[in-house]
């Protein structure tokens, strides 16, 4: 279990920035095809908040090495990204998307308040201070849906159990102090099984290793900027 | 406050929010500081509402446009901390929201934001019997609610 304080380091900032950016792109893939209009709008809003948080951190990281946020977002290759692997996984069905969101929201719910209070850097503190409140709304949304689907129909429950099986091996990079308690309380309310805390988990993004999915995601996200370098609106 | 900064505040009070034109940028509470610099230059400090709000860049441009005719140089800068909160909206601003058909944020923000609040009344008919339809709405700052009495849906400006 890692400490939230590690995330104020340069490597930690990169993990947060890339995690928010990549997950924002994944959520944006639901636009116009979410199960209901309200959910389409909700995921769009959450994606926008995450994009704003990523931009705040990427601009700041870029300022220190003399490159722009766009350079970092659009002209790095997969091995340069440090997002938790779970952020790049394909959306799957809505249950899969919303459980992944719960896992990430619970991570950020632990991380942002610590950064807002203790990050040595003023910009990081400012981004975190804003994100604390945005994340509260995201977590409220993902928790409510995990409970509704887990404790819902036979079909919705079957899908949530499948999502839990698929996503649990990716929790390792998110499971900072307090993460299990948050996630388990929602899973319990959702009447879902509690997988073992000590089960095997992936932890490889810090070395630049990724799933095969990140390359495809970046190919789409970066295509416009790479086809027209330096283009502006 | 100098004569110049007072004039700048007056001018800023005429710059509408691009998404909710009933409110000015001053009503929103995002203007944190106005300074008079040497040589007919002024500096305005803004605090963004939401991290990813697309209106942020438009607002900075509109503020610049509103002041540029009058001052030799206008600097608009961003301050992230302390983070913007709906607590910075005046009662007058909340009244304008209501008149525009948007229920204003109710109550003050306490962290962690476990209580996200609820509109006290339907902005259309005034009934207190309201229910949430969706926690997110047409802009980052709003949620979608419905009145159980007049059955009309309405926007609620989220407590933030």
Image: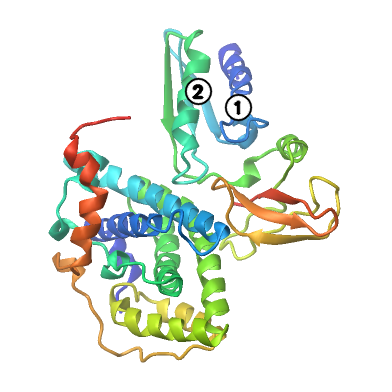
Q: Disc 2 is attached to a residue of which chain?
A: B
* Relative horizontal placement of residue A179, taking residue B120 as reference (left or right): left
Residue that badge 2 annotates: B62
**Residue at the image point whose x is 57% and y is 72% from the top:** A144
Residue that badge 1 annotates: B16
Nearer the observer, B36 or B144: B144
The percent coordinates of residue A103 (x first, y second) are 40, 73
Q: Is residue B65 above or below residue A51?
A: above
Nearer the observer, A220 or A56: A220
Sequence order check: which comes first, mark 2 or mark 1?
1
* Relative horizontal placement of residue B58, taking residue A7 as reference (left or right): right
Q: Disc 1 is attached to a residue of which chain?
A: B
Contact (Cβ within 8 Å) of mark 2 with mark 1: yes
Q: Is residue A84 above or below residue B143?
A: below
**Residue at the image point whose x is 18% and y is 59% from the top:** A215
Q: Does residue B139 appear in the picture of this structure? A: yes
Query: Could you tell me how many numbered marks the image carries?
Result: 2
Q: Cα distance, mark 2 to mark 1?
A: 8 Å
**What is the secondary structure assignment of the residue under circle 1?**
loop
Q: Does residue A66 appear in the picture of this structure? A: no
Q: Residues within 10 Å of mark 2 (few under 14, many from 20)?
A: some
């Amino acid at each position: 279990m890692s400490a939230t304080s590690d995330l104020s380091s340069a490597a930690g900032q990169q993990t947060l920035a890339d995690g928010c950016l990549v997950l924002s792109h994944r959520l944006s893939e639901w636009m116009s095809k979410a199960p209901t209009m309200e959910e389409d709008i909700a995921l769009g809003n959450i994606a926008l908040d995450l994009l704003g948080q990523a931009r705040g951190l990427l601009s700041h990281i870029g300022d220190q090495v003399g490159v722009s946020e766009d350079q970092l977002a659009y002209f790095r290759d997969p091995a340069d990204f440090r997002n938790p692997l779970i952020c790049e996984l394909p959306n799957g069905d809505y249950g899969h998307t919303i459980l992944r969101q719960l896992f990430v929201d619970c991570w950020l719910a632990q991380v942002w308040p610590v950064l807002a209070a203790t990050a040595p850097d003023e910009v990081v503190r400012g981004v975190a201070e804003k994100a604390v409140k945005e994340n509260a709304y995201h977590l409220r949304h993902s928790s409510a849906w995990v409970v509704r689907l887990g404790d819902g129909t036979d079909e919705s429950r079957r899908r949530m159990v499948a999502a839990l099986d698929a996503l649990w091996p990716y929790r390792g990079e998110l499971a900072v102090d307090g993460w299990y308690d948050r996630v388990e309380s929602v899973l319990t309310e959702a009447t879902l099984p509690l997988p073992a805390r000590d089960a095997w988990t992936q932890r490889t993004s810090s070395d630049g290793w990724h799933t095969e999915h990140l390359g495809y995601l970046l190919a789409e996200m970066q295509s416009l900027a790479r086809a027209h370098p330096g283009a502006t609106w | 406050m100098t004569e110049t900064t007072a004039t700048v505040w007056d001018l800023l009070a005429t710059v509408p929010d691009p998404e909710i034109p009933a409110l000015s940028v001053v009503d929103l509470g995002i203007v944190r500081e106005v300074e008079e610099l040497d040589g007919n230059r002024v500096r305005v400090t803004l605090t963004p509402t939401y991290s990813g709000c697309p209106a942020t860049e438009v607002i900075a441009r509109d503020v610049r446009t509103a002041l540029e005719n009058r001052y030799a140089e206008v600097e608009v800068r961003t301050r992230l901390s302390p983070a913007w909160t709906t607590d910075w909206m005046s009662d007058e601003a909340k009244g304008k929201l209501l008149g525009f058909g948007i229920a204003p944020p109710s109550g003050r923000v306490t962290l962690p934001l476990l209580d996200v609040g609820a509109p006290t009344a339907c902005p259309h008919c005034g009934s207190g019997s309201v229910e949430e339809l969706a926690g997110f709405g047409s802009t980052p700052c709003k949620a979608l609610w419905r009145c159980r009495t007049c059955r009309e849906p309405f926007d609620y400006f989220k407590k933030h």
